Image: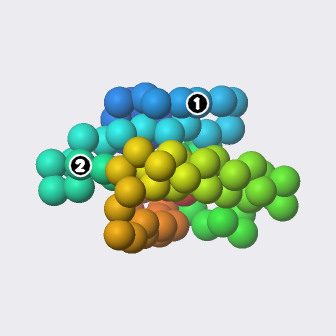
Amino acid sequence: MACVFCDSSGGALIWQDALCRVVHPGEPDYPALCRVIWNRHVCEMTDLTAPERERFMRVVFAVEQALRDMLQPDKINIASLGNAVPHLH
């Protein structure tokens, strides 16, 4: 089965380590959208071990802080997805 997050980075690669990566998908309607993508097929946060969850959220919070510092938005939205593509992102 083809998987967009296995077959490609999912966008312009900003940062990565062995567990996850941060990409800018280039969504025209959401120019500041960044995704933190878990590298293996995992649908839910609770599918991760506690240390993996902590690592994932440290990356999410670092991305949020960088976006706030650079863009000074009125609001940041964070969502946990994995329903259409079985990669937590």
Dot 2 falls on a residue whose secondary structure is loop
Badge nearest the viewer, 1 or 2 = 2
Res 41 visible: no
Q: Which residue is at a point 31% across and 42% down the rendered structure image?
A: 25
Dot 1 and dot 2 residues touching (CB under 8 Å) = no
Residue situated in front as seen by the camera: 53 or 78: 78
**Residue 54: percent from the left, percent from the top?**
77, 56
Q: Which residue is at a point 55% across and 37% down the rendered structure image?
A: 21
Q: Which residue is at a point 65% across and 30% down the rendered structure image?
A: 17
User: Which three-letter amino acid code belongs to the residue tagged 2?
Assistant: Pro
Image quarter hosting the N terminus = top left
Q: Residue furthest left?
A: 28
Q: Which mark is residue 16?
A: 1
Residue situated in front as seen by the camera: 16 or 67: 67
Dot 1 falls on a residue whose secondary structure is strand
User: Which three-letter amino acid code belongs to the residue tagged 1?
Assistant: Gln
Q: Which residue is at a point 16% across and 56% down the rendered structure image?
A: 29
Q: Which mark is residue 82?
A: none
**Residue 59: percent from the left, percent from the top?**
63, 47
* Count of number-bearing discs: 2
The CA span between labels 1 and 2 is 20 Å
Q: Tell which circle, 1 or 2, labels the residue nearer the N-terminal end.
A: 1
Residue situated in front as seen by the camera: 64 or 19: 64
Res 51 visible: yes
**Residue 68: percent from the left, percent from the top?**
46, 55
Q: Is residue 43 left or right of residue 32?
A: right
For mark 2, does the 10 Å Cα neighbourhood hold few (<14), some (14 to 19), or many (20 or more) residues?
few
Looking at the image, what colour scheme do you see? rainbow
- Residue that carries the numbered disc 2 in the rendered image: 31
Residue 24 lies, with reference to residue 47, above or below; the image says above
Residue 11 lies, with reference to residue 62, above or below; the image says above
Residue 26 lies, with reference to residue 64, above or below; the image says above
